[in-house]
Amino acid sequence: MGMMSEFKTFAMKGNVMDLAVGVIIGGAFGKIVDSMVGDVIMPVISALLGGQLDFSSFLVPLGAVPEGTAMTLDALKKAGVPVFAYGNFITILINFIILAFIIFMMIKMMNRWKQAEPAAPEAPPAPSASEVLLAEIRDELKKRTA
């Protein structure tokens, strides 16, 4: 079997295709969560905490800041100043918590659906060889007495 045909066999397995679909949907879902956090949740948190709060501006320069450099993450990085940007971490942490909660709720809902489905009735087991033989003997005896 050539390498290309082996790869085709591998790529067409159900698990690989499921994984590919999951990665694509996960990437799109991540963008939705980013938008929800940045456009919906963070403005509400900002309003609750007293106004124009932008977590990305929460940072601590870890070195000397050249004079005239703005105290923004981009400006400090351009100036070569090491920066402890904990505000960006807070935003990413909120994204993660929301994403983990949504995935938890989806799995919980899927498990509930699986439990709600009635179990398929089990097929009766095939008769053993001795049962088949006894049935044949019974049928033969019925023929003789009839």
Image (tube, helix red, strand yellow):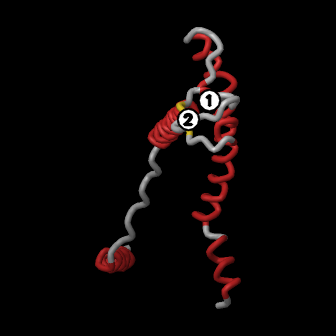
Give residue 48's position: percent from left, percent from top: 57, 10
Measure the C-alpha gap from mark 2 to mark 1: 7 Å
| Contact (Cβ within 8 Å) of mark 2 with mark 1 | yes
Give the SS element for disc 1: helix
Q: Within 10 angstroms of label 2, few (less than 14), some, or many (20 or more) residues? A: some
* Residue beneath the point at 58% across and 34% down: 88
Give residue 52's position: percent from left, percent from top: 65, 14
- Which three-letter amino acid code belongs to the residue tagged 2? Ala
Q: Is residue 135 left or right of residue 98?
A: left
Task: Depth check: give the residue in front, 96 or 5.
Answer: 96
Q: Please state, as top left, top right, bottom left or bottom right, where the C terminus lies in the image.
A: bottom left
Give residue 95's position: percent from left, percent from top: 57, 34
* Residue beneath the point at 33% across and 75% down: 128
Residue denoted by label 1: 56
Q: Residue furthest bottom?
A: 1
Give residue 122's position: percent from left, percent from top: 42, 56
Residue denoted by label 2: 85
Q: Is residue 23 left or right of residue 94?
A: right
Give the SS element for disc 2: loop
Q: Is residue 106 left or right of residue 8?
A: left
